[in-house]
Image (cartoon, rainbow, N blue to C red):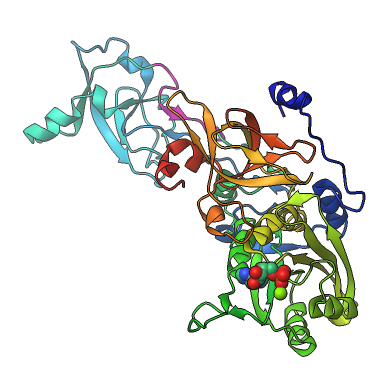
Amino acid sequence: MTQHRHKAHEDRPHRHHYDAEMLSVEEARDRILSYFSQLEPEETELVDALDMVLAEDLTAPFDVPPLANSAMDGYAVVSSDLASASETSAVELPVAFSIAAGQIPESDLSSGSVARIMTGAPVPDGADAVVPFEDTDELERRKNGSGNEDRIGINLAAEPGDNVRVAGEDIARGELVLRSGTLLRPGAIGVAASLGRASVQAYRRPIVAIISTGDELLSPGEPHQAGKIYNSNAYSVAAEVKRYGGVPLMSGIARDTIESLQERLAEALETADMVVTSAGVSKGDYDVVKDVLAKNGEIALWSVRMRPAKPLAFGTLDGPGGRKVPHLGLPGNPVSAMVAFEQFGRPAIHTMMGRNLQQKPSVHVVLDDPVNNYDGRRVYARVFVYRDEDGTLRARSTGTQSSGALTSMAVANGLAICPDDVSKIDAGETAVVEMLDWPEDVFSGFGHTTGA
Ligand code: AMP
Ligand code: MG
């Protein structure tokens, strides 16, 4: 939050009072995360290890590159042979042999001769520099087909070391290259491969079972029926699980009966590291969901000081063998389910994967549309963030902020925050936006046409 923003709201007449029973987002998140810890490491194929956390130290068993090699296609030379070479006066020398990448030179290079060499090929002993083709008469000789390709004219004096990559330039043998705890981003995965590893120990991905509850739900793919709605929550939440590195387990729809939910739960608990349900968690309503969950473990129903997604359930379920499986009960409204998952499911997945808990990346933007706060909760308003012609980051509303209107989420790339003690942020004022997508879509301008 900027100085500027604070100032802008200092003298607002209308301040809300906290509901003592409500948890702040941070309090709810802290309580939830106290139930999670890093899962065990697992040998993981490198191609599957993106965004996982390394669970071993990787030390180099050899130099990378293994030998001094050429940075260019050209000629390996003894630089002192070329002292008099220039653009106007070439030094002509015999080509003793040639070396392709992956070959070991057939002999040392002696003064008074050169070796044709390809990028990445080992520089022969005796040579101390490489002159690229562009600085020789290579092309002319080939064009003329004069048949005297066993000699070459060089138009450039070379310094020792020119265009030579020394052995171990990148990684020295014995070096600790990647420490346990490193996040395996693409570059780190490449480095592991360059050490010859096809797999590494990494903290495994959690299996997140997703159960939707409700008699009104149809599965996508089923014929449409009047009065029913399709189960979108399972799909949006599964996509969030995947995005944050977990493995979604589609555990289907539980009807509003004890048997149905128990059946779905039993199946999910076989393998799940975490169970996510949607709907049936509002306080006050009679709901079979709460009863069944309570019978199969512990459940607490919370009100979280946020909008959308005030009702939230959290507890544990009794898995096979006495295993306690954390359970996150999301609200049923489609936007609420997604926003609650961003705030509570995402950090749970990251904790299980051994990733540091980080806030979602956020930016300060100028609002095109006001964000209203009616009842003293932290508002997460769906917005589209873009850069205007002046390079300023701005955000416009993606439309109705009803927690049932999922399209507002589909076009949003961020959630603009109105703090719980601020009743409104006006258009033209600054707000913090937690980004849902980061960062290319914000900066490419691609979204200008997809925003509302
Ligand atoms: P509830 O929490 O059961 O009161 O549900 C709140 C709203 O979310 C209702 O309009 C439900 O129809 C809707 N809803 C519940 N579950 C889902 C789901 N899986 N997919 C889409 N909408 C849902
Ligand atoms: Mg319901």
Which image quarter is the N terminus in? top right
Q: Which residues are magenta?
A: 159-169
Q: Is residue 448 above or below residue 138?
A: below
Q: Is residue 168 left or right of residue 4?
A: left
Report the front residue among 37 and 398.
Answer: 398
Residue 361 covered by magenta stretch: no
Report the front residue among 331 and 446.
Answer: 331
Q: Image quadrant of ligand 2?
A: bottom right
Q: Is residue 250 left or right of residue 94?
A: right
Q: Residue at x 79, y 68 (%)?
A: 281
Percent of width and height locating residue 10: 78, 24
Note whether residue 263 is visible: yes
Q: Residue at x 19, y 29 (%)?
A: 138
- Which quadrant of the view contains residue 197? bottom right
Q: Residue at x 86, y 79 (%)?
A: 291
Q: Is residue 229 left or right of residue 5?
A: left
| Count of all numbered marks drawn on residues in the image | 0
Q: Is residue 285 above or below residue 312?
A: below
Percent of width and height locating residue 89: 19, 11
